[in-house]
Image (spheres, rainbow, N blue to C red):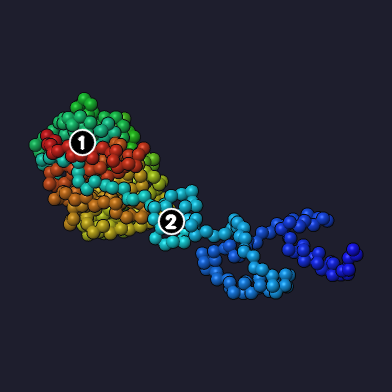
């Protein structure tokens, strides 16, 4: 039987069949490739992304298309849903944090960026001393320096006219020397290495003792009044006196002193050599802070900003040329200086007389001790000068301060005739306060 359809109508019928069987039809001429995939909208959960497609418009379009292809009486076939790998599934929704390789403990604001790792909490400084020593006859005199801690872990303390040695490792107490009834000890200072201890007296003499043998090595003169401060630089010993003079003494030389430094107009009460032994800082009751070099007999720098006596002096072991100084009752300030550029860096009003300063060797922190009126001890973080701790317990001015050789412990002395030991700095190797020495009290004993 002959086909009665025209070529044009036959072409249209073939086209309709191709559309109907599009899932099975493949073009004979070429393979269709595409780099795009648009997921079926009907399978997408638009509520999760805040979109609301019009379902009515979609149904109307499908009805018109079915009528055009199959006629008005075409049956409605069920919708065969095919999987859509890009569909948002409510049941599989997960937190953004669950996709992160990091762990987050809380999510106060859903949808926000992941939190940063919390800051490390501040280091805990024990607020009580772990040991207290009774020190009868420890003088209440701002201008004296009666306590020092040696490289060999031995504490020297001047009580009246005597010097006692307390071995921090064994707690053994040794009486080093006793001056005559008409004299008293005004300062003590250990050499940077070895067992030599310098002793300054009220009569103006300076004695050198070998602590290992409890024997005096030599006695040097020159000062007319008491020697209240001493500082070592290798074999060179500097002594400051109420006679306003600083003598430089080389213990290897036969002479009592090798040079004389004049610059202060009142008693010299503070001396400190820089860690590189190139500069000497001196403070006096004339409210001046002076800086000298190894060869000068006149100060190379003069700072006159303090308004009270300058006893507290400390060089930073971390930054070259960084010097800190503290003023007395009428001043109460800690000032920081850059001796390289000859400039003042900062000034902090502490609220109390500044008696001593010491820098930590292990971290960039420092301790100050105070007198009128709060008698406190403050641990500072530098350079922010935020307070890590305020320690109290002394009932008199905290006039004396020394740092242990390991850099973790300080000892403080006051006119209340006690020496108190505090853990204030972390060790050089570990920042863990739980492993620091002195976590428990060792009781109260007497130094003589």
The disc at residue 115 is: 2
Q: Position of residue 178 (x, y in %)?
A: 13, 33
Residue 269 higher or lower than 114, as above or below: above
The residue under label 1 is 156
Name the one closer to the observer, 396 or 225.
396
- Separation of residues labelled 1 and 2 (CA atoms): 52 Å
Q: Residue at x 9, y 37 (%)?
A: 181
Name the one closer to the observer, 162 or 107.
107
Q: Is residue 4 visible?
A: yes
Pointer 1 or 2: first along the chain: 2
Q: Secondary structure at mark 1?
A: strand
Name the one closer to the observer, 128 or 2.
2
Q: Residue at x 84, y 70 (%)?
A: 9
**Quadrant in the picture for the C terminus:** top left
In the visual, does 108 lie left or right of 192? right
Residue 102 higher or lower than 34, as above or below: above
Q: Quadrant of residue 418?
A: top left
């Amino acid at each position: 039987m002959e086909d009665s359809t025209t070529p044009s109508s036959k072409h249209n019928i073939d086209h309709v069949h191709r559309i109907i069987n599009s899932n099975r039809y493949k073009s004979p001429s070429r393979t269709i490739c595409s780099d795009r995939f648009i997921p079926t909208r009907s399978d997408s959960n638009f509520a999760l992304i805040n979109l609301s497609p019009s379902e009515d418009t979609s149904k109307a379009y499908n009805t018109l298309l079915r009528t055009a292809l199959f006629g008005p009486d075409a049956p409605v076939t069920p919708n065969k849903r095919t999987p859509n790998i890009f569909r948002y599934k409510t049941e599989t929704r997960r937190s953004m944090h669950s996709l992160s390789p990091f762990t987050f403990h809380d999510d106060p604001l859903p949808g926000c960026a992941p939190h940063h790792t919390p800051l490390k909490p501040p280091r805990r400084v024990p607020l009580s001393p772990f040991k207290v020593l009774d020190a009868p006859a420890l003088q209440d005199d701002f201008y004296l320096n009666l306590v020092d801690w040696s490289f060999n872990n031995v504490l020297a303390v001047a009580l009246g006219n005597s010097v006692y040695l307390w071995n921090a490792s064994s707690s053994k107490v040794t009486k080093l020397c006793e001056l005559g009834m008409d004299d008293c000890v005004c300062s003590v200072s250990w050499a940077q290495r070895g067992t030599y201890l310098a002793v300054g007296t009220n009569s103006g003499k300076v004695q050198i003792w070998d602590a290992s043998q409890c024997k005096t090595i030599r006695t040097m003169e020159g000062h007319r009044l008491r020697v209240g401060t001493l500082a070592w630089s290798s074999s060179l010993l500097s002594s400051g006196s109420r006679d306003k003079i600083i003598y430089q003494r080389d213990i290897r030389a036969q002479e009592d002193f090798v040079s004389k430094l004049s610059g202060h107009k009142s008693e010299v009460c503070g001396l400190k050599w820089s860690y590189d032994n190139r500069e000497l800082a001196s403070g006096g009751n004339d409210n001046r802070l002076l800086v000298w070099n190894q060869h000068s007999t006149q100060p190379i720098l003069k700072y006159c900003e303090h308004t009270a006596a300058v006893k507290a002096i400390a060089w930073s072991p971390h930054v070259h040329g960084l010097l800190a100084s503290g003023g007395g009752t009428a001043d109460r300030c800690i000032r920081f200086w850059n001796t390289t550029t000859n400039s003042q860096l900062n000034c902090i009003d502490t609220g109390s007389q500044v008696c001593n300063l010491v820098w930590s060797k292990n971290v960039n922190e420092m301790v100050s001790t105070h007198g009128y009126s709060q008698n406190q001890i403050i641990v500072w973080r530098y350079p922010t000068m935020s307070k890590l701790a305020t320690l109290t317990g002394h009932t008199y001015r905290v006039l004396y301060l020394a740092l242990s050789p390991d850099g973790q412990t300080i000892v403080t002395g006051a006119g209340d005739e006690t020496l108190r030991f505090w853990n204030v700095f972390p060790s050089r190797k570990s920042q863990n306060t739980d492993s620091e020495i002195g976590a428990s009290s060792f009781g109260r004993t007497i130094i003589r």
